[in-house]
Image (cartoon, helix red, strand yellow):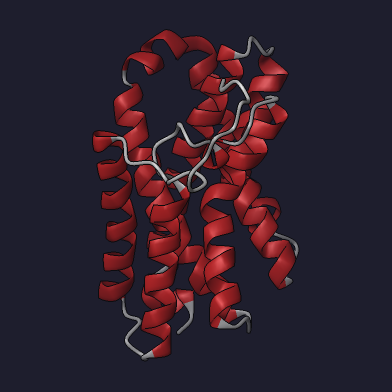
Amino acid sequence: MQLEQLFSPSVQHTLDVIGIFVFAISGALLAVRKNFDVFGIAVLAEVTALGGGLFRDVIIGAVPPAAFTDLGYFVTPLLAALVVFFLHPHVERIQSAVLVFDAAGLGLFCVSGTTKAYSYGLGLTASATLGLATAVGGGVLRDVLANEVPSLLRWDRDLYAVPAIVGSAMVVLCIRYDILTPLTSGFAALTAFVLRLLAMRFHWRAPRAWNRRSTVTEE
């Protein structure tokens, strides 16, 4: 089923813009914490918001990517950067709310990324992989540019990639059994969203190597 058949273009565009804005906020906040200038704040906001989608679109051949054909996609991160530049103390105080919206964006993007990849002819496994990349790719690029170990690779961070993997896997299972509908795709996004919220609430983390006895000092 094509993505356009699941949601109307206007609804899909609105959801995308909301997700892009929230991801951009997280990128801009990290730039402020790193003491970046206004250009650095804007770059990190753009990369965080659009990086995963750009990677997906290039891989599947959806070129030029939507970020370069829809002005709203490009401008939205700049607006988020502007908000953070002037109001970052206030934004920091509502960080918990930002994380909730970030979790919602994670759920949305893992579903939309998987569906779009499949609609361009990729197999189920590859589609799920690109759904994951859509959801977390921008955050990885953000951390690399900020000279940090990507959050989804650190054992001391709450689960982030796993909820996206679950959401993407649910989508490909729905495709496999021909039950992908707005309801089932929404349920997949909701599942990823709830798993991420639970991980933040109860500090769920992925296990490290079995019987680990490393002498390396942990950061």
Of residues 10 and 92, the one drawn nearer to the viewer in this rendering: 92
**On screen, 211 above or below 81?**
below
Q: Is residue 193 visible?
A: yes
Q: Is residue 140 left or right of residue 61?
A: left
- With 206 as the anchor, is 29 left or right in this view? right
Q: Is residue 111 above or below residue 40?
A: below
Query: x, y (%) of residue 3?
Result: 47, 74
Quadrant for the N terminus in the image: bottom left
The x and y percentages for residue 42 are 65, 26
Q: Quadrant of residue 40?
A: top right
Counting from the top left corner in percent of width and height, residue 82 is at 55, 21
The residue at the point 29 percent across, 51 percent down is 195
Determine whether 93 is above or below 51 in the image.
Answer: above
145 horizontally vs 151: left or right: right
Residue 97 in the image: above or below residue 168: above
Q: Quadrant of residue 45?
A: top right
Residue at position x 72%, y 66% from top?
A: 59
Counting every numbered tag in the picture gives 0
Percent position (x, y) of residue 129?
Answer: 57, 66
- Residue plotted at (30% across, 26% down): 96
Work out whether residue 99 or residue 201 is closer to the camera in this orientation and state it.
201
Task: Kindly tell me whether residue 15 is visible in this rendering.
Answer: no
Which residue sits at x=31%, y=42%?
199
- Looking at the rendered image, the quarter that the C terminus falls into is top right
